[in-house]
Amino acid sequence: MRLSDIAGRGDIVIQCHDIPDADTIASGFALLCFLESLGTSARLVYGGRNPITKPNLLWMLKLLQIPIEHVEELRVPSLLVTVDCQYGAGNLRRFDAREFAVLDHHRPEIPEGPLVVIQPSLGSCSTLVWNMMRIDGFDFASRPDVFTALYYGLFTDTNGLAEMRHPLDRDLSEFMPVDWTVIKKLKNSALSIDELEVVADTLSSSRMIGNMGLLRSQPCDPNLLGFSSDIAQQVEQFGSCVVYCDTPMGVKLSIRSAAREVMANELAVFLTSGAGSGGGGIEKAGGFISYESIEKIAPGMSPDDFILSRIEEYQNSFDLVYCGNHNIDFSAMRRFRKLPVPLGYAHTADIFPEGTQISVRTLEGDIDTTAGRDTYLMIGISGEAYPIKRERHEKSYEVLDAPYTPNIEYSPVVMNKMTGEKKSALPFARSCVPRGDKIIRAAELSRNTKVFSDWDREKYFYGRAGDYIAAPESDFSDVYIINRGIFGKTYCEV
Ligand SMILES: [Mn+2]
């Protein structure tokens, strides 16, 4: 579905969820302005018992002149569009409508439909609406108010941009034009005095599970939760910490980590797996677990016990492997070589001038490097990308005379870190195939395993049971992980 598909229907109402937050308001406001730009007028409303009282939201409505109405009743519109929530779900008042559309980034709770767009991998609904408006050619340059609202929606839903999940979130966070005066005002009216007391209560609830801090908060704004976890993470004894609170549909989690053995985003994915969604960065991440899933997975278990059991499960869930200092017997493993499946590679110096500090944006995160004649960028079959030295590339791959056109969800983008200019890497990519002479030893993992290399102090390779642990036959200290799906497609036994 494209946003322009719903324009021109006449009598459209856009509905935010009850107890509106900045993300739902921004999404609704942007959609309203988009429809107006196509000559379609609409109303922006929310239901529920209480009108908006949070100081930052009141300022948002005032400074950006957002015409949102709190309604009890609604004359049946021909189309009702729910933003940041799903028509028929429990967190928004149900109004009758002849037809409905949904734009959301939470877990799907309703069946698919031609006017239902739900993308849980996104950090905010603002990201979804922004991207759809961009695809439809909306002129953001002339509407800094609209973009500022969307930016603030993303900002608040991702704890000040710290828990962004998807490359599109990062793209939105760098897009212009933002009215920084407005953002500054909103950022500095986030807390009421009562909320400061919520933070104090949360901090006094802390306890230790292994070397992890666990804190429970009263129901509160996600930003407040992030604020509490930022403070808790500074406690010396906490390698990482998890702060959570109840929301109408489930439990919201804010996660921080300073321990080398725990990346916050990986912990978030583990805690929420099969029960919600989670993600973010290495040090800060967030997640959501629905009550419905808890009831399905562990009938009768309280959310508190569920989170505690997941944390204990996590702490016993993985082995640690340090490159150069491990006792894995690779010589006993089976031998494999890479299949001649074409991969992509690009010369970084073709994309930006030599010496430019660049950042490569992929589904797995951003990787920083410097453009240069000796630095190539490899692009894998799933769009995974990583820098490789020219010498190593020449040794390991044979160059084909063909462009590289894989079918992938998000193609890697290369950003000039000085100017912010971005270019897709794919138009610069050519195909290459692995030379058949490199043999590796590999075995399927029976337990989750974290592999620490010497050349990256911050990150580790995370392998889940079923993925492969591997090392080149020429150097067993150079351990790495190969994803199960990619292994099956790109390696064969010798
Ligand atoms: Mn949201």
Image (cartoon, helix red, strand yellow):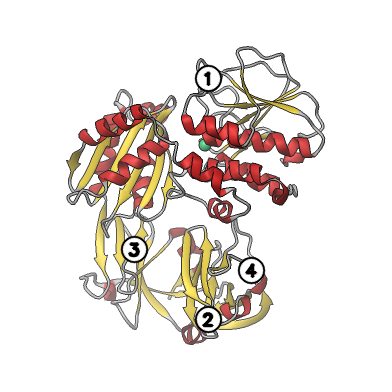
Residue of label 1: 51
Q: Secondary structure at mark 2?
A: loop
Q: CA distance from mark 4 to mark 2?
A: 21 Å
Kindly indicate the quadrant of the structure image that contains residue 231: top left
Q: CA distance from mark 3 to mark 2?
A: 27 Å
Mark 4 in CB contact with mark 2 (< 8 angstroms): no
Q: CA distance from mark 4 to mark 3?
A: 27 Å
Counting residues from the N terminus, which is met first, the one under dot 4 or under dot 3?
A: 4
Q: Nearer the viewer, mark 2 or mark 1?
A: 1
Residue 450 horizontal side relative to residue 37, left or right: left
Mark 4 in CB contact with mark 3 (< 8 angstroms): no
Is residue 447 in sight in this rendering? no
Residue of label 2: 355
Mark 4 in CB contact with mark 1 (< 8 angstroms): no
Counting residues from the N terminus, which is met first, the one under dot 4 or under dot 2?
A: 2
Mark 1: few/some/many CA within 10 Å (<14, 14-19, 20+): some
Residue drawn where x is 57% and y is 39% of the image: 125
The amino acid on which the numbered mark 1 sits, given as a three-letter code, is Pro
Mark 2: few/some/many CA within 10 Å (<14, 14-19, 20+): few
Q: CA distance from mark 3 to mark 1?
A: 46 Å
Q: Position of residue 487 (x, y in %)?
A: 46, 64
